Amino acid sequence: MRWGGQVFLSYDSRDGSRLANLLRHELGRGSPQIDCSADLTTIDPDDALDEAATAIDRCACFLFLATPMSLQGDTPTKLEWKLAFDYKKPIVVIQAGESAPVGRLARRPRIRIGQDQTVSAEALRLLIVGTATSEGELQTVQGYLEDAREARARARHAS
């Protein structure tokens, strides 16, 4: 896969807007330029799911900004990362604060930052662009294989 520069940045606006804007700015001005323009805040709520699905389907990588609010049960971010899993996208988790993702998200590459700190844009850029390398693609496939094994084990125990 060749790096196209477009990522989908998923965040909860209640506690992630400031950091999402900082990430968008920092990644957009470096080299290679990473476009985090996918933002669904301006679209009609009736079309939100279709718009999100289209944007996630087209992106090269899915960034999930894991803040305390985005990790709660039923949030729009949950729908977005479920779509990313459905489309088998490379997923990079940016953990802001102490709350850590669990399950499938916990197995994805992750950068940890404090809630009020800035992220190392260059480290994040390398991780994102790395998802398009042969090694990155293999890591993504291995993550999805582990997901399938876990689902299979759960199905066996349920029956």
Image: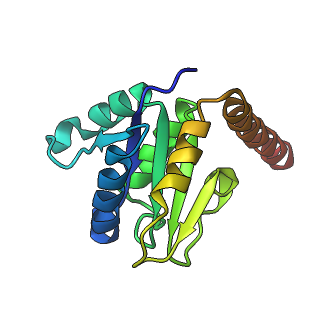
Place of residue 113 in the rendered image (x, y in percent of width and height, measured from the top left): 52, 71
Query: Picture quarter containing residue 53?
Result: top left
- Using the image, determine if residue 81 lies above or below residue 23: above
Query: Picture quarter containing residue 34?
Result: top left
127 on left or right of 39: right
Q: Quadrant of the N terminus?
A: top right
Q: Quadrant of the C terminus?
A: top right
- Using the image, determine if residue 14 lies above or below residue 154: below
In this view, the residue farthest toward the top is 1
Exactly how many numbered labels are in the figure?
0
Place of residue 155 in the rendered image (x, y in percent of width and height, measured from the top left): 79, 42
Front one among 144 and 25: 25
Place of residue 84 in the rendered image (x, y in percent of width and height, measured from the top left): 50, 38
- Using the image, determine if residue 134 lies above or below residue 52: above
68 on left or right of 24: right
Q: Residue at x 29, y 53 (%)?
A: 25
Q: Residue at x 46, y 65 (%)?
A: 119
Q: Residue at x 67, y 56 (%)?
A: 103
Place of residue 152 in the rendered image (x, y in percent of width and height, measured from the top left): 80, 39
What colour scheme was applied to this rendering of the protein? rainbow
Q: Residue at x 40, y 53 (%)?
A: 77
Query: Picture quarter containing residue 90?
Result: top right
